[in-house]
Image (tube, rainbow, N blue to C red):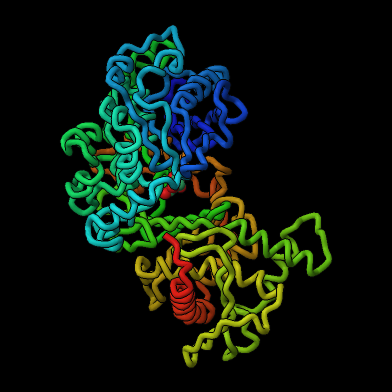
């Protein structure tokens, strides 16, 4: 490619770092720069990127830290030799739900940025509040109860906004803010999400919310495409509704909209071209589904400390246990998300118990786990009509379903539908397979209404299953994922290390600038994406017979969850 060909930057402002990733029009990564908040920042007493006030269950991040990080990432790209003149578009991915409170002088300070100074040196005074509540915050139980009640119950709130009330969601956070800091709230001129905050810095004025990220607030009526007046009324607390509406601002529908050119600050300080255009930054999860041309009916499973499941789908079928967001680029599509609290840790506990029972400390701790999981028959069934073993394994409180931490083991007889809570016959060996099955069956149960038959008389299932994150390297997990979730084209590992969000953001910038009129993201990225470079087929998906057997197990699993939830409620262990 010519040395003056266009480049695009995708930023990823996440919990523990800011990353800037530069791609060309062919989607090839040219530069990556990182600023690790704990390791590279100075002046902030943070741990893992955040501060805690345990007494009130608050988790929050200093906004000035992010300014320092952006100064750092841009400097690092300059040092690596990036010719900023070639950058035609900028977009970003922000950790979802966090909010930034701008003060009365914000617009003036943003408009008059001085290229001789760093962003941190001149924008500290732009905020009415120095901190941004973080998605790990859980201080808003009271406000969540009010949000859930506002439309009748959690089901109705989920119908309208795509999710029931969650501690981290921005609406309940803002309501608590009006109560805890009423004077500061009044002095707040605008409220940004982390994503729109990032876009604001480049634009030199406060950017609107992104059409997908706005769905993480419990305020946006997804079907109507407007704020829900009843929820904005609740969220404004004792203050005027119109005042809050002004602080929130408009929400443009087009995820590829040209918000404006970069501010002169970036032109003069770094040598950006004056016509470099800012495209709306979105949330980190919506950006993740843009890291490849994910088609409706493809599923992405992120196997990290917690499990996240993402799908692009034309169906809108909200439920209090799941999330729906507007798709970040494609009107008429939605992003479906399951966000578990448990995942990797639960698998590690079983792995360690297994190695201990085998009196083995293998150099590769997963080797025995994989071997045992693969040797065990599906659902621990000794013969095709025997009882199925299944369980729930939650070392942490879980939200899908909403239940305290704990372990429950059952056997299920699919021929009679009978379910029995018992540890009889369970061995540590059985658990290696059972833990992975439990996680995958839960995903299948909750996504089954969204999948379609791929034709040829095959049952409804995803077209492809993409695995990302640490657990995707594990062969046994990939194989069991394929057996349970299906996937006519197979199970793939998406190998973009931990760059998925930043890549998705960079691709969004490419699409925003280079799309033909009416051209979708999927079409543009689909034409340019080099599959061999990023994905590898690592396991079979749909296998006739096994998939259907797990279909029976899904029925038993659903019953098992209901029974456990009922038992816990009766014991008074129900969890908010
Ligand atoms: C999603 C969520 C997290 C954050 C940070 O609802 O809270 O995934 O987006 O990554």
Q: Above or below — where is 227 with respect to 110? A: below
Q: Above or below — where is 354 with respect to 549? A: above
Q: Which quadrant: the C terminus?
A: bottom left
Residue 218 can be seen, yes or no: yes
Residue nearest the observer in this picture, 446 or 537:
446
Residue 162, given in percent of the width and then of the height, sits at 30, 55
Q: How many marks?
A: 0
- Residue drawn at point x = 33 percent, y = 63 percent: 319
Residue 432, given in percent of the width and then of the height, sits at 66, 69
- Residue drawn at point x = 37 percent, y = 13 percent: 265
Residue 83, given in percent of the width and then of the height, sits at 48, 18
Residue 261 can be seen, yes or no: no
Q: Quadrant of residue 132?
A: top left
Residue nearest the observer in this picture, 313 or 162:
162
Q: Above or below — where is 40 with respect to 237? A: above
| Horizontal arrangement in the rendering, residue 147 relative to residue 367 (left or right) | left
- Residue drawn at point x = 46 percent, y = 61 percent: 464
Outermost residue on the top side: it is 116
- Residue drawn at point x = 37 percent, y = 67 percent: 451
Residue nearest the observer in this picture, 2 or 270:
270
């Amino acid at each position: 490619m010519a040395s003056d060909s266009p480049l695009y930057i995708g930023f990823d402002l996440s919990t523990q770092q800011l990353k800037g990733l530069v791609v060309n029009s062919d989607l090839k990564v040219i530069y990556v720069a990182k600023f690790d908040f704990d390791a590279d920042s100075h002046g902030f007493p943070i741990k893992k990127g955040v501060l805690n006030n345990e007494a009130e269950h608050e988790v929050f991040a200093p906004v000035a830290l992010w300014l320092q990080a952006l100064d750092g990432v841009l400097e690092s790209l300059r040092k690596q030799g990036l010719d900023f003149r070639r950058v035609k578009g900028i977009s970003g991915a922000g950790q979802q739900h966090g909010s930034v409170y701008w003060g009365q002088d914000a617009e003036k300070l943003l408009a008059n940025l001085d290229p001789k100074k760093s962003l941190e040196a001149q924008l500290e005074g732009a905020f009415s509040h120095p901190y941004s509540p973080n998605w790990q915050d859980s201080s808003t139980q009271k406000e969540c109860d009010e949000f859930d009640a506002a439309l009748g119950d959690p089901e109705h709130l989920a119908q309208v906004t795509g999710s029931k009330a969650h501690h981290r969601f921005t609406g309940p956070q803002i309501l608590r803010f009006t109560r805890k800091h009423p004077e500061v709230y009044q002095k707040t001129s605008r409220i940004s999400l982390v994503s729109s905050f990032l876009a604001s810095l480049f634009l030199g004025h406060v950017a609107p919310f992104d059409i997908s990220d706005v769905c993480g607030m419990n305020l946006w009526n997804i079907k109507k495409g407007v704020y829900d007046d009843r929820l904005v009324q609740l969220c404004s607390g004792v203050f005027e509704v119109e005042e809050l509406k002004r602080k929130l601002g408009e929400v443009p529908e087009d995820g590829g909209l040209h918000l404006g050119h970069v501010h002169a600050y970036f032109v003069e300080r770094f040598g950006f071209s004056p016509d470099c255009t800012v495209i709306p930054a979105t949330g980190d999860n919506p950006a993740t589904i843009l890291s490849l041309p994910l088609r409706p009916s493809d599923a992405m499973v992120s196997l990290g400390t917690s499990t996240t499941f993402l799908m692009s789908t034309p169906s809108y079928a909200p439920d209090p246990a799941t999330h729906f967001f507007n798709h970040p680029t494609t009107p008429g599509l939605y992003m479906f998300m399951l966000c578990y609290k448990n995942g990797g840790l639960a698998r590690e506990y079983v792995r360690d118990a297994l190695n201990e029972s085998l009196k083995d400390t293998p150099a590769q701790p997963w080797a025995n786990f994989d071997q045992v999981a693969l040797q065990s028959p599906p659902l621990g069934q000794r013969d095709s009509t025997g009882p199925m073993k299944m369980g729930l394994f939650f070392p942490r409180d879980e939200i899908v379903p909403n239940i305290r931490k704990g372990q429950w083991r059952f056997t299920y007889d699919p021929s009679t539908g009978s379910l029995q809570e018992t540890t009889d016959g369970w061995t540590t060996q059985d658990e290696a397979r059972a833990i992975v099955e439990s996680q995958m069956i839960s995903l299948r149960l909750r996504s089954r209404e969204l999948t379609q038959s791929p034709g040829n008389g095959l049952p409804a299932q995803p077209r492809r299953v993409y695995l990302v994150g640490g657990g995707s390297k594990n062969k046994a997990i990939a194989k069991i994922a394929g057996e349970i979730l299906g996937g006519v084209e197979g199970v793939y590992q998406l190998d973009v290390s931990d760059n998925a969000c930043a890549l998705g953001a960079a691709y969004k910038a490419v699409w925003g600038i280079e799309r033909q009129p009416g051209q979708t993201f999927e079409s543009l990225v689909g034409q340019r994406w080099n599959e061999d470079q990023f994905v590898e087929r690592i396991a079979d998906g749909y296998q006739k017979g096994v998939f259907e057997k797990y279909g029976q197990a899904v029925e038993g699993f659903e019953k098992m969850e209901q029974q456990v939830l009922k038992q816990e409620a009766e014991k008074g262990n129900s969890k908010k």
